[in-house]
Image (tube, rainbow, N blue to C red):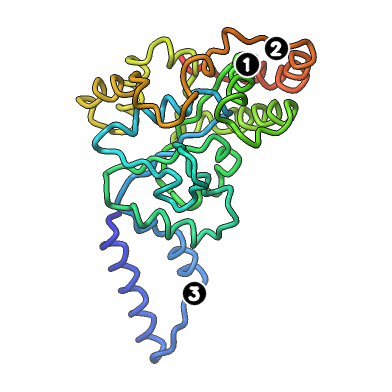
């Protein structure tokens, strides 16, 4: 429903009940409930990228943000910057009310057909995001836990600060994957397998563009810019920190990954394979 049409309907209903009750506003509970279900008055379409840290969220973001149809809602745009370069906003991890969050998004609304927000840990706030953005699309990444944690270990040496303990990182992977298992059949969710995306970027990228409704004529330029490491905003986010090939996990780290993540990964494999 177009914003102006929804607003007109709301005004008309309110005027009717105002007159009917002699100038006294008296709305039945069923009407109040219906008004609350009206679509958000937003012009742009919203895309949220989330998943375990080091599972491909940055690569997806770097592909999509280069489309002329997409505007990235990063920390600078959302007023959450802490003075370092980032692709993330982290807005749902801040102590902000729903009204305050929406006010910040509304500053960007209408500036591009699509508004893109990426913060891996926002997967823990997915229900709240879905309630605020009724028609949002979610790209949720997945990566096998051992390679994911290997990449995370390398990243903590370069650009990840406040990384917490190894066990806490494993639990973040587990929590994110459990949310994906719960939501993978939702029509607003597209699961993205890290290895499929990295090995078949053009094919998977085309599927993503089609699903989101983006112009596929922009895909190749987006992929070229994504692969151009001179355009990387965060030093260390690509290269060795992605693959972790020169790094190994010690036996304690391997044991933690196995203990915390193994059963959840088995459930994911049994539930759904992205491609």
Q: 98 or 240, which is in the foreground?
A: 240
Residue under pointer 3: 28
Task: Using the numbered discs, state the Cα–Cα distance from disc 3 to disc 1 in whole angstroms.
Answer: 57 Å
- Quadrant assignment, res 179: top right
Q: Residues within 10 Å of mark 3 (few under 14, many from 20)?
A: few
Question: Where is mark 2, residue-wise?
Answer: 249
User: Quadrant location of residue 212?
Assistant: top left
Between label 3 and label 2, give the one nearer the viewer: 2
Residue that appears at 48% across and 69% down: 32
Q: Nearer the viewer, residue 221 or 190?
A: 221
Q: Position of residue 121 (x, y in %)?
A: 58, 37
In the figure, is residue 167 to the left or right of 82? right
Rendered image quadrant of residue 120 = top right
Q: Residue 214 at what x, y percent from top left?
A: 27, 32
Residue neighbourhood size for the residue with mark 2, other residues' Cα within 10 Å, grouped as few (<14), some (14–19), many (≥20): some
Sequence order check, earlier mark of 2 and 1: 1
**Disc 3 or 1, which lies upstream in sequence?**
3
Query: In the image, 58: left or right of 249?
Result: left
Query: Which circle marks residue 150 in the picture?
Result: 1
Q: CA distance from mark 2 to mark 1?
A: 7 Å
Q: Earlier in the sequence, mark 3 or mark 2?
A: 3
């Amino acid at each position: 429903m177009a914003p102006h049409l929804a607003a007109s309907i709301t005004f008309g209903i309110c005027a009717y009940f105002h007159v009917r009750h002699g100038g006294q506003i008296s709305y039945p509970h069923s009407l109040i409930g219906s008004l609350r279900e009206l679509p958000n008055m937003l012009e742009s379409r919203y895309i949220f990228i989330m998943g375990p840290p080091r599972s491909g969220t940055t690569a997806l973001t770097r592909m999509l943000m280069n489309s002329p149809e997409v505007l990235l809602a990063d920390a600078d745009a959302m007023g959450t910057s802490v003075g370092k370069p980032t692709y993330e906003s982290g807005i749902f991890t801040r102590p902000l009310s729903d009204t305050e969050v929406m006010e910040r998004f509304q500053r960007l609304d209408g500036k591009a057909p699509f508004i893109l927000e990426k913060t891996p840990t926002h997967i823990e706030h997915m229900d709240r995001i879905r309630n605020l953005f009724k028609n949002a699309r979610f790209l949720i990444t997945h990566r096998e836990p051992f390679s994911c944690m290997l990449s995370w270990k390398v990243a903590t040496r370069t650009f990840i600060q406040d990384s917490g303990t190894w066990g806490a990182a494993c639990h973040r992977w587990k929590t994110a994957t459990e949310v994906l298992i719960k939501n993978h059949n939702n029509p607003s969710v597209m699961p993205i397998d890290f290895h499929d995306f990295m090995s078949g970027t053009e094919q998977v990228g085309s599927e993503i563009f089609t699903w989101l409704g983006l112009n596929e004529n922009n895909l190749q330029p987006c992929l070229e810019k994504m692969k151009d490491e001179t355009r990387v905003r965060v030093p260390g986010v690509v290269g060795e920190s992605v693959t972790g090939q020169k790094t190994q996990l010690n036996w304690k780290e391997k044991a933690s990954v196995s203990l915390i993540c193994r059963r959840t990964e088995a459930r994911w494999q049994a539930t759904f394979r992205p491609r």
